[in-house]
Image (cartoon, grey):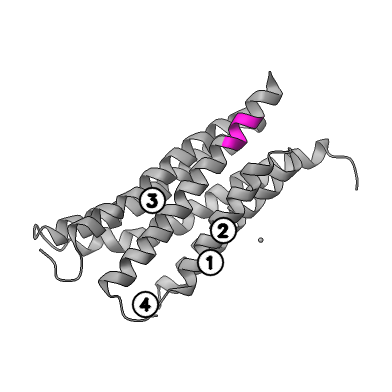
Amino acid sequence: MSETHSLGLVLLDFVPNLAFLVGAYFLVRWVKLTSSRLSVVAMIAGSALVFLGGTLKATWKLLYTLGIGDFWLLSELQFILLAPGFLTMLASVLLVLKQERKSWKPGSLAMAPWKIPLLGTMTLSSLGLQGILSYIAFRRKAYLAATIYIFAILCMLGLAGLAGGEQTIARQWIEESINATGQIAFALGCYLLYSRAEMVRE
């Protein structure tokens, strides 16, 4: 068993990924209702990359903690997959936003150097994704969804504020709890946005 990761903490690391998957499912269904096939394909592809990247990182932690092996490449793949994943999801909602505008009347510490641009792209794309989703939700009068997206953004910013420093067990529990809460909020926001679109459609 690893001295730096408890089994409970490692298992908690899977929760944000599962919550994200639920949110992505409803997001894909929402895009299907509101936009073009290209937007749907981009959302599916981006969501798959993000889910895979996060799950591989959690799997690496689990295998390492159980003493099975240190498959470090699984951890490094997170940065390689998340950045283009969130960027592709952002492109998808930008296409939705472009289509939405047509119908509106006048009136976003320690780390290897190569990871920095990927982390920046991932963070900005994720913030942009949820910011635009919140904006669209407000426009569609899905106020609760919009508010929940803002809460998810605050969780993400909170995680950024905790970056760096000594990674104690207590600190990791706090970070994983904030991450899980933010991803659950993302999932709930996506469900509410999709539900609103279905209700209007009927």
Q: Residue at x 45, y 47 (%)?
A: 184
**Label 3 vs 4, first from the N-terminus:** 3
**Label 4 vs 1, first from the N-terminus:** 4
Gap between marks 2 and 4 measured at Cα: 23 Å
In what quadrant of the picture does the C terminus appear? top right
Gap between marks 3 and 4 measured at Cα: 22 Å
Q: Position of residue 127 (x, y in %)?
A: 58, 59
Q: For the residue marked with disc 1, what is the amino acid?
A: Leu
Q: Is residue 103 left or right of residue 151?
A: right
> Seen from this angle, which residue lies furthest top?
202
| Residue 172 highlighted magenta (yes or no) | no
Q: The magenta stretch spans which residues? A: 192-196
Contact, CB < 8 Å: mark 2 with mark 3?
no
Front-lying residue, 67 or 7: 7
What element does badge 1 sit on? helix
In what quadrant of the picture does the N terminus appear? bottom left
Q: For the residue marked with disc 4, what is the amino acid?
A: Met
Q: Which mark is drawn over residue 14? A: none
